Image: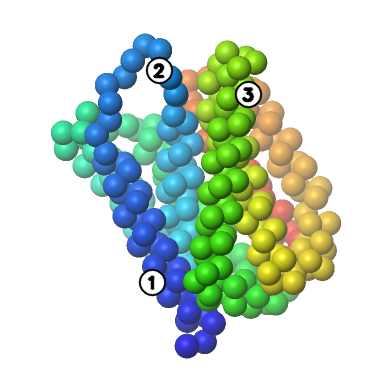
Amino acid sequence: MIPHELAVRNWRIVFLIWFVLLATATHLPQPLPTDNPTFVSPDKLLHFICFGMLAFCLIGTEWIKSPLLCWLVLAVWAIVDEITQDLLPLNRTFSFEDLIAGELGIATIMYWSGALGKESTKKIKEEVTAILAVPKNWYQLGFIGFIVTAILFVSIWSFLREFFDEQYSSVALCVAFLTGLLCVLRTIICKGNLQIESRVLLKSMVPWLIGTIGIASMTGFLFNNASINVSVIVFAILVVGFRIAWNRAT
């Protein structure tokens, strides 16, 4: 099998594993809420990230060629996922906020579909495909992403709770996940010898990245006391903004 076929096969395996894990996690019985919980879960941001990752994996499977159809399939599944949680005796109810967070995660990731389709990114695509064609590379990338995210999340969450006496779970997860993602990207760059290409792209992207981070920060500040979950909105702005920066650079 050629590297592309091997990479697609691995994407399909990862998609099925992630789908099962996500469906299981969202259908586990939920404990009764308490007035002073030990840990406040960043639930909405988790929905955004987890369903976004599901969309990212589905793109890689190439089972559905059309990005629009891919989005529709996952959008319907997100609705079914919420409805079944409400129907089953899990102490869970249909949450419109959870659904919106998941749908937004799917939509923003779908915006990245075809990011490596340009002629200018041909070498990057070939090297990434060659890396993802090897199963052991998936283990390494997954391990790096999970460990960095988990350790950093616990560290930031503990620090903020100790010094501010508040559970900034969404902030901790946002910083930890982005850092874990950067570590994964750095590993791919090193494995694919893409240091030169990455420097050129990063140099072109810097102004747009700074602008995106600025907009996301201002949004978080302005809507900090609003009823909406601001962490999801901020994360969506970052994902879309980074894609715009990538388009400009490539």
Q: Earlier in the sequence, mark 1 or mark 3?
A: 1
Q: Are the residues tagged 2 and 3 within 8 Å (C-beta)? A: no
Give the structural element (helix, strand or loop) at label 3.
helix
Q: Give the total of numbered labels.
A: 3
Q: In the picture provided, is 50 more to the left or to the right than 115?
A: left
Q: Is residue 86 left or right of residue 50?
A: left
Asked if 11 appears above or below 202 in the picture, the reply is below
Residue identifier under label 3: 159
Residue at 54 percent of width and 55 percent of height? 143
Cα separation, mark 1 vs mark 3, equals: 43 Å
Quarter of the image for residue 103 reads top left
**Colouring of the image:** rainbow
Q: Is residue 52 left or right of residue 225?
A: left
Could you tell me which residue is drawn at 21 percent across and 33 percent down? 90
User: What is the crowding at mark 3: few (fewer than 14 residues within 10 Å), some, or many (at least 20)?
Assistant: some
Between disc 2 and disc 3, whose residue precedes?
Answer: 2
Determine whether label 1 and label 3 are within 8 Å by CB: no
**Whether residue 203 is situated above or below residue 173 in the rendered picture:** below
Q: Quadrant of residue 222?
A: top right
Where is mark 1, residue-wise?
Answer: 63
Q: Residue furthest bottom?
A: 1
Q: Quadrant of the C terminus?
A: bottom right
Residue nearest the viewer, comparing 212 with 86 = 86
Identify which residue, 39 or 170, lies in the foreground. Answer: 39
Q: Amino acid at mark 2?
A: Pro
Q: Earlier in the sequence, mark 2 or mark 1?
A: 2
Residue 227: % across, % down: 48, 20
Front disc: 2 or 1: 2
Q: Specify the label residue 6 is tagged with.
A: none
Res. 129 image quadrant: bottom right
Residue at which label 2 appears: 37
